[in-house]
Image (cartoon, rainbow, N blue to C red):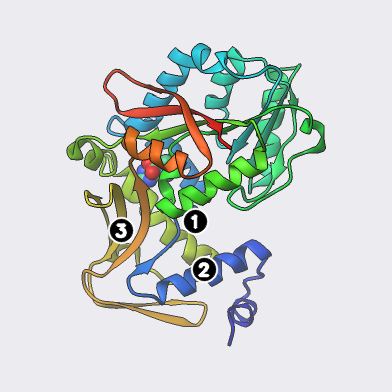
Amino acid sequence: MNVHAHALAQGYPFDEQTSAFAGDVIENLAQYPKRLSPKYFYDATGSALFEQITVLPEYYPTRTELGILRDRGREIAADIPKPAALVEFGAGATTKVRLLLQHCEFGAYVPVDISGEFLSAQADGLRKDFPDLDVHPVAADFTTPFALPAEIADMPKVGFFPGSTLGNFEPHEASSFLRTAREILSDGAQMIIGVDLEKDERVLYDAYNDAAGVTARFNLNVLVRINRELGGNFDLSAFTHRSIYNRDRHRIEMHLISRKAQNVRILGNNFSFRPGESIHTENSYKYSFERFTALARSSGWSVRKSWTDPARMFSVHALVASD
Ligand code: AVJ
């Protein structure tokens, strides 16, 4: 029986998104090593847990990037052509974009996100605070080519990709994302991008193993989501959160480790776990200035300027499309 038939039989009416989720989960748990995409962390609970992560004492990236945007916003804005259209890839909370909007007169703001609902709420808030700004939300998956609104056709475009979201991509995916972004934004485009830096392993380790256990709950929540949306029967107490720094590959890895031999059923499929077996749930790549510059260069961009905080924890780069 296919996943749809099972879903129907169990009373799970599937929309397009849920069936994509189901297909992806079943395919990736059937492989060895087992894995789940980090994009599935962000249901309502996961998004709220991530907001909690951003204010943890150990989790330095968000507050450090905000500090850079706050302290250097004027400088970052100085070389942006006016009026340009600001295109944000993945639009979470509007805190960061506000720091750019404050310092630079943009002609339009185009938040691009897969969740249309969330987008329109955010857009309304921004329109209230920046009454002269044209906000044109686009509901799309920003990792694949999409069309920009006709209203900004004649403006120079500036991409915005904060939060080290780039770190979730494999290096080859990061490169193809940057290439796609350059294509979408077209010739002469610029891009402001936030990238987490490689640093002391202890600091990295602690940021993904917080004492309060919020990151563990965030990681485990993807199993809660599978149970709820796909009728899975994961026993949460039988899995444990593990984050490690993989030095050779310059990345934090998050895993969920099976505490024992067990079987899990999801939509008629059986997945068996050995004791200690992992589900690899996330990579968070860290870049040195050198490696990021090389990545940008090989992906159609050159680094115009970079900013960091005094402790060199996080970086913000201004990229210009190269020809
Ligand atoms: C949203 C991908 C930037 O990698 O630091 C935080 C997600 N995972 N704690 C990151 C995350 C665990 C975060 N990014």
Can the viewer see residue 49 in this picture? no
CA gap, disc 1 and disc 2: 10 Å
Can the viewer see residue 228 in this picture? yes
Where does ligand 1 appear, by image quarter? Answer: top left
Contact? badges 1 and 3 (CB < 8 Å)? no
- Residue bearing the label numbered 1: 40
Contact? badges 1 and 2 (CB < 8 Å)? yes
Indicate the quadrant containing the N terminus: top left, top right, bottom left or bottom right.
bottom right
Residue 94 position (above or below residue 147): above
Contact? badges 3 and 2 (CB < 8 Å)? no
Q: Type of residue at label 1?
A: Tyr
CA gap, disc 1 and disc 3: 14 Å
Indicate the quadrant containing the C terminus: top left, top right, bottom left or bottom right.
top right
Classed neighbour count for the residue bearing mark 2: other residues with Cα under 10 Å, few (<14), some (14–19), many (≥20): some
Q: Type of residue at label 2?
A: Asp
Q: Type of residue at label 3?
A: His
| Ligand 1 within 8 Å of the CB at mark 2 | no
Which type of secondary structure does the marked residue at label 3 adopt?
strand
**Could you say which is closer to the camera, residue 31 or residue 161?**
161
**Could you say which is closer to the camera, residue 234 or residue 21?**
21
User: Which of the numbered marks, if any, corresponds to residue 166?
Assistant: none
Residue 131 position (above or below residue 28): above
Residue 255: x, y in percent? 30, 58
Identity of the residue furthest to the right in this view: 150
Left or right, residue 51 beside residue 312:
right
- Residue bearing the label numbered 2: 24
- Residue at coordinates 31% horizontally, 36% vertically from top-left? 288
Identity of the residue furthest to the front in this view: 323
Residue 24 position (above or below residue 157): below
